[in-house]
Image (cartoon, rainbow, N blue to C red):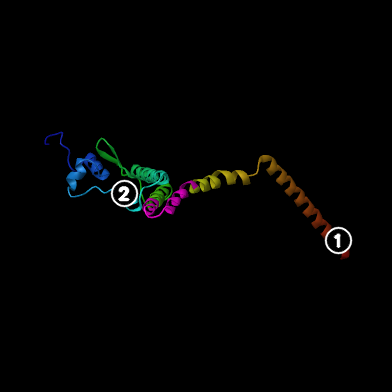
Amino acid sequence: MSGPRARDATSPHALASLSRGSGDAARAANPHRAPLPSPPKLAFAYRRLVRGSPTARHYVGGGFGAAVALASLAALRAHARPVYVRGALEDGGGDLAAGGMVSTFHDAVYVSSAALALGAATDWSLLLLLLFPLYGLVKVYTAVIHPWIVTPTADEEAAHAAAAERRAKAAAKAARGAKAKAQRRA
């Protein structure tokens, strides 16, 4: 195509389609690139061909692991995607080396990919997928349940303040009594 409607190879739209790795632009950029099968497909093929027929537990575990990996990759892609306004770059995208949720998404991709890859060889590796709900339970406990348990109510704080005041008065009275006793001895 030529003329005003033709897209330049360096336009933001062409670069965005190249970064996604799909479509005609990606194939035109590297015609020798063969599509690679995903880890769930490889695990399923190995399980089917070498180890025999997969059971329902493999389908459920593999589906959960694939869903976690694909959702995490989609979140990472959305975080790193640049923003163009009228053809001009407005935001270059987020930093994938940052901590916080980005680090959690990376960990989710690693754990689910390892569980799927090892799931082809052994049935027990799908138990690695239980790390996700356990991690969620730990986060809920540390952020919600534990502070709710250990934070005193207003009534308890008032009772603690009154008790501390009584202890301070008793300590002051004991100190005065000790001082008076010392003066009488002297």
Give the side of residue 112 with respect to residue 85, left or right: right
> In front here: 112 or 27?
112
Whole-angstrom CA distance, mark 2 to mark 1, is: 91 Å
Q: Find out whether residue 2 is within the magenta segment.
A: no
| Quadrant, the C terminus | bottom right
Disc marking residue 121? none
Q: What element carries label 2?
A: helix
Identify the amino acid type marked 2. Answer: Ala
Residue occupying the point 84% across, 57% down: 177
Instruction: Name, please, the residue furthest toward the front.
Output: 52
Q: How crowded is mark 1: few (under 14 residues within 10 Å), some or many (20 or more)?
A: few
Identify the amino acid type marked 1. Answer: Lys
Magenta span main SS: helix
Instruction: Name, please, the residue furthest toward the left.
Output: 2
Q: Where is residue 135 in the image (x, y as percent from the top left)?
A: 49, 48
| Nearest-to-viewer mark from 2 and 1 | 2
Instruction: Name, please, the residue furthest toward the bottom.
Output: 186
Q: Position of residue 42 (x, y in %)?
A: 31, 50
Magenta highlight range: 114-133
Q: Where is residue 109 in the image (x, y as percent from the top left)?
A: 38, 49
Give the side of residue 51 with respect to residue 14, left or right: right
Q: How many marks?
A: 2
Name the residue beneath numbered marker 2. 45
Disc marking residue 181? 1
Q: Find out whether residue 132 is within the magenta segment.
A: yes
| Quadrant, the N terminus | top left
